[in-house]
Amino acid sequence: MSFRSVIAVLGVLAVVGLLVFGLASKGSSGLAIGDPVPTAALPRLEGGGSGSLAAYRGRWVLVNFWASWCEPCRAEAPALEKFQRAHGGPRFAVLGIDTRDLSGDGQDFVREFGLSYPQLRDGDGGAAHDYGTSGVPETFLVDPRGRLRLHVPGPVDEKTLESSVAPLLPQGKS
Amino acid sequence: MRARAILLAALALALALLAPAAGAAERASLTEIEKQVMCPVCGTLLQLAESPQAQRERVFINHLIAEGKTEAEIKDALVAEYGNEVLALPPDSGFSLSAYVVPILALLVAAAALAIGVLRWRRAGGGQDGDDGAPRPAAPSERDSERLDADLARYDL
């Protein structure tokens, strides 16, 4: 193969490589049941500092991605708060992640619905992307080993939470 | 003395009139900012977005405009909320600088490669042949030229 041919092949490979990289970096990876979930630290929505799912290792966690501008998120918020009050404890917690939202709007949302469970902030949507979400709201149940056990795209309600999530949790007050 | 006082008064008046105009020129406008920032959820310019998130972003910008923030301050505030991806054009610092530098470097490399290619082609005798790649015929000899002229002279062209 001549020098020119090698250069041409390398050029084509470089272009194809760039296209593949571009598509791969834009695409959402998505999580399958049993996959370890991302644990990158995120700022807290209120009070400063940061938090991470890694801090919940050993507990069941219901991770809920939401945004204040999202109507279905408003519809499901009371059900999530009720579920947290009923099942929250040393072995289970709901964790909210406010994504692609204004922090002030997110804080108002938390106050409006009286949400008592912890809230993290994902302003640029990086965490939502890492979880493979396609919108808001989306909810993920993570087991004590940090692996995905259940994924609910779209809003949850009391019935879904009690019929799909509660049976997976340890018996009694979690 | 009186003329100087009038001149000073006129100068003060002119300054008083110009100062608000200068301030107004610096005042940020939603229309201008909308062209420079994205709606992060829609993936389009805010100017083109109509989603609920875009509406909240506009309210946020208008609020900052009302507070007297400059365009740069408002864009900084948006970056603090949504990250760098909210900017339609990446910042010209850090890794994002490559978005500006790489295309220019690529253009320079392509131009250099083209120039080297053309030089090599010319050295190899390129351009000496006809369009169909066949060698160009040699120039006619003096005798052939005379015959050609004589032939042409016989025709009334």
Image (spheres, rainbow, N blue to C red):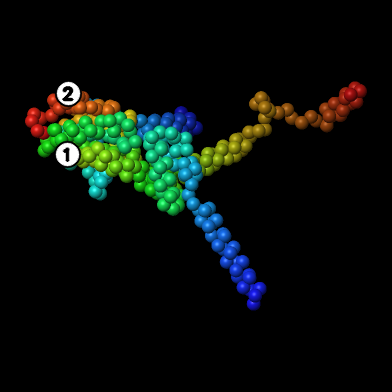
Residue drawn 57% across the image and 66% down it: B12
Residue type at tag 1:
Tyr
Quadrant the N terminus of chain B occupies? bottom right
Q: Which residue is mark 1?
A: A56
Residue bearing the label numbered 2: A163
Q: Residues within 10 Å of mark 1 (few under 14, many from 20)?
A: many
Mark 2 residue type: Ser
Image location (x, y in percent) of residue A115: 22, 39
Q: Nearer the viewer, residue A24 or A106?
A: A106
Q: Position of residue A169 (x, y in %)?
A: 13, 29
Residue shown at 57% from the left, 60% from the top? B17
* Relative horizontal placement of residue B14, taking residue A158 as reference (left or right): right
Question: Residue B69 versus residue B148: which sits nearer the camera?
Answer: B69
The answer to whether residue B137 is visible is yes
Q: Position of residue B81 (x, y in %)?
A: 35, 44
Q: Earlier in the sequence, mark 1 or mark 2?
A: 1
Question: Looking at the image, is B150 positioned above or below residue B58?
Answer: above
Q: Chain of mark 2?
A: A
Residue at mark 1 to residue at mark 2: CA–CA distance: 23 Å
The residue sitting at the left extreme is A172
Q: Is residue A110 above or below residue A161?
A: below
